[in-house]
Amino acid sequence: MKKILVFALILSCSLATMAQNKFGIRGGITSTDFNPKELIVLNQNDLEQLKISVDQASYGYHFGLFAQFNKGRWALQPEVLFNSNRISYNVDDNISTSIKDEKFNFVDIPVLVRYKMGPLRLQAGPVGHFFVNSTSELKTLEGYKENFDEMAFGVQYGLGLEIWKTVLDFKWERNFNNYGDHVVFDDTSYNFDSSPNRFIVSIGIKF
C-alpha cells in the first residue's frame, strides 16, 4: 500500500501544472484471453502426481477513480482501480478430476496518454498491478503454496468515446508476466506458457 501512495503522490506532483483538470469515477468488466499449457506436477520421485489446466476464465469486474489532465488535443489519464478476477482450474490426480476455483484481487494503476479526435480518443500507456489478496481452492491440494508477485506490469491501448460527462472506453491489455507464476508445489514453481491478455470495457462519469 505504501508503494501505491508514493506512486500516486509523485504522479500528482508531476501533473500539477497542467490545465483543464477533470476527475471522475468508473467501473466495468474484463475478459481474459489466453491458451496456457497443461501443468504436470511431479512428486519427489519425478512420478506424475496431478495435472492442472485452466477450465474457464470468468469475466472480472473493476471500479475506481480517474483523473484527466488536458492540454489541447492531448490528455494524461491516470486511474486507480480495484480489479477482481476468477479462474476455474481442471485438476486430474490420476484417480478423479475436479474443478478448483480461484479468485484474486489487484489494485490497478494505468497511466494513459490520450489524443482527441472529435468525440473519439486514442489511448495507450503502461499499467501497474498491485496484488491485494486471493482465495483459492488449490490450497486444498497437498504441497500447494501461494506465490503471487506483489507487483506486475503491462500495457493498455484502445479507443475511448466521450459525450458530455460520460466516458466509454474499450481497451486491450497485454501483461509482461507469464500467467500462473504463483503455482508452487513443494517449493517448485510451475508456470503457464502465455501471458494473460485482457479486453476491458468501462464507463465513467466526469465531475
Image (cartoon, rainbow, N blue to C red):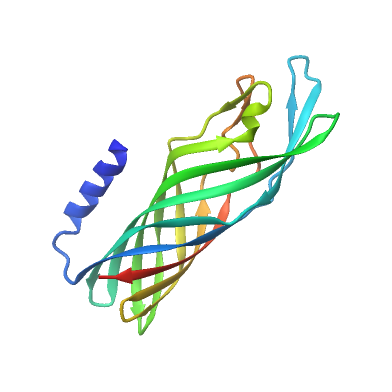
Picture coordinates of residue 30, whole percent (x, y): 53, 59
Q: Residue 168's image quarter?
A: bottom left
Instruction: Please indicate whether residue 132 sits to the left or right of residue 184 in the image.
Output: left
Residue ID at (51%, 34%) = 148
Q: Residue 141's image quarter?
A: top right
Instruction: Please indicate whether residue 191 sits to the left or right of residue 164 in the image.
Output: right
Task: Indicate whether 197 appears above or below 176.
Answer: below
Task: Indicate whether 191 appears above or below 86.
Answer: above
Quarter of the image with the N terminus is top left
Q: Residue 206's image quarter?
A: bottom left
Residue 194 seen from this side: no
Picture coordinates of residue 195, whole percent (x, y): 58, 48
Residue that extends furthest to the bottom in the rendered view of this protein: 118
Residue 153 seen from this side: yes
Task: Indicate whether 128 appears above or below 2.
Answer: below
Residue ID at (78%, 19%) = 46
Quarter of the image with the C terminus is bottom left
Picture coordinates of residue 190, whole percent (x, y): 65, 31
